[in-house]
Image (cartoon, rainbow, N blue to C red):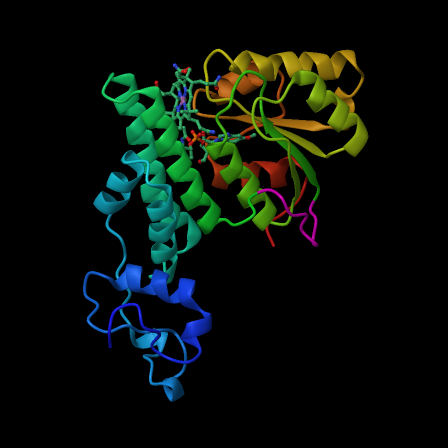
Amino acid sequence: MSEGAPCCPKCQDDRPNIDRLILAWAASATTLFCEHPNSFGCYPRATLNLKKPTPDQISRCILDGNASQAADLARACLDAGLDPLQALDPFVAAIRHAGDLFEEGEFFLPQLLLASDAMKAALAVIFPGSGAAASPLSRGTVLAGTVQGDIHEIGKNLVCALLSANGFRVIDLGGDVHLDTFLDQARQLQPDLLALSALLTTTMMQQKNLIVRLQETGLRGQVKVMVGGAPVTADWARSIGADGYAPDAARAVDEALRLLGQHRA
Ligand code: B1M
C-alpha cells in the first residue's frame, strides 16, 4: 500500500485519526493501519503494540517548542494506554527543564514562550476542555484564576482540569486576573471556593491582597480560599489566612474536597 493512501473505505473519512495512529507507531510501522474492524482488511487496534513516546522525545519536542508534535505525542501516550496523569508527567518534567535552562541563561524568553505553547497543546489533548465545563454532578463551584500580574496558566489549567474531572463546577477566569475581577465574579457567581494560583514570588502577595479585600468587602465569610503555585507553601497559606493549600493538582482535588466537606466518590 502506498503511503498516504487510505487503508479502508472508512479511513478515507477518518484521515486525521489514521495519521495520528501512524505517527504513534511510526518507528516500527511497515503497513498503514486503522482501528476499524477486520471486515475492512485493517488491523484491529488491540493487537497493535502502539509505541509509547520516550521521555527524551517529549523533552526534545517541548524544548523545540513544537506544538503540533507535542499534541501528537500526547495522543500517542494516551493511545499507548497511559492514564492522563501518567501521560502528562514527562511533559511537566520537560517544561520545568525549560525553566531551569531559562534560569541558567541557556534559554531566552521567546524559547520559553514556544515551549509553553507546546506544553499547552499537550495539556489540551490530555485534558480536553480543561476547566471550562460545568460537571453535571457538581460537588460545588470553584472560581479559579492566576492572580494579578502573573500570566502563568499551565499549572492552574491542570488544577482546573482535575477539579472538573472530579465533579466540581469550575469557572476559570484565566491568567493575570485583576483583584476586582475576582471580587466582582465572587459576588455574582457565589462560588464555594476560590482557587488562586501564583507562580512568581512577586505575585504571591496578590493572594494575600485578595484575602484582605474579601474581608473588607464582607465576602470572606461566604467563600473558602485555596492557594497554590510553585513558590507557595503551607506556611505562606497559613500566614495569609487562606483556608487551604495544595502543592500539586492531584492534592488540590483532595484539598477542595476537604474544604467543602466532601468525600471522594
Ligand atoms: Co515563567 N517563570 N516567567 N514563564 N516559567 C517561572 C515560574 C520561573 C521559576 C522560571 C525560572 O526562572 N526558573 C521564574 C519565576 C521566578 C520566581 O519568581 N521565583 C519565571 C519568570 C521569572 C518569568 C518571567 C518574569 C520571565 C521574564 O519575563 N523575564 C515572566 C513572567 C511573566 C508574568 O507572569 N508577568 C515569565 C513568563 C513565562 C512564559 C510566558 C514564557 C511561560 C508561561 C506561559 C503560560 O503559562 N501561559 C513561563 C513558564 C512556562 C515558566 C516555567 C518554565 C514553567 C511553569 C509551568 O507551567 N510549570 C517556570 C519554571 C518552573 O516552574 N520550574 C517559570 C508546569 C506546571 C504543571 O507546574 O505551574 O508549578 P506549576 O503548577 C503545579 C503546582 O505549582 C500546583 O499544581 C500544578 C500542577 O501540579 N499549582 C497549584 C499551581 N497552581 C495551583 C493552585 C492551587 C493548587 C496547586 O490551588 C489554587
In the picture, which quadrant includes the N terminus?
bottom left
How far across and how far down the image is residue 250, in percent? 48, 41
- The correct choice, above or below, for 109 with respect to 20 in the image is above
Residue at x-position 28% and y-position 41%: 61
Q: Quadrant of ligand 1?
A: top left
Does residue 20 appear to the left or right of 145 in the view shown? left
- The correct choice, above or below, for 61 with respect to 186 in the image is below
In the picture, which quadrant includes the C terminus?
bottom right
How far across and how far down the image is residue 80, in percent? 33, 61
How far across and how far down the image is residue 255, in percent? 57, 36
Viewer can see residue 240: no
Let me know if residue 181 is in the magenta part: no
Residue at x-position 44% and y-position 69%: 14
Identify the main secondary structure in magenta.
loop
- The correct choice, above or below, for 59 with respect to 19 in the image is above
Q: Nearer the viewer, residue 84 or 23?
A: 23
Residue at x-position 30% and y-position 64%: 22
Does residue 17 appear to the left or right of 204 in the view shown? left
- The correct choice, above or below, for 19 with respect to 230 in the image is below
Does residue 47 appear to the left or right of 132 in the view shown? left
Q: Nearer the viewer, residue 139 or 94?
A: 94
How far across and how far down the image is residue 4, in percent? 30, 68
- Residue farthest bottom in this picture: 39
User: Which stretch is magenta?
Assistant: 131-139
Q: Quadrant of residue 258?
A: top right
Q: Nearer the viewer, residue 215 or 203?
A: 203
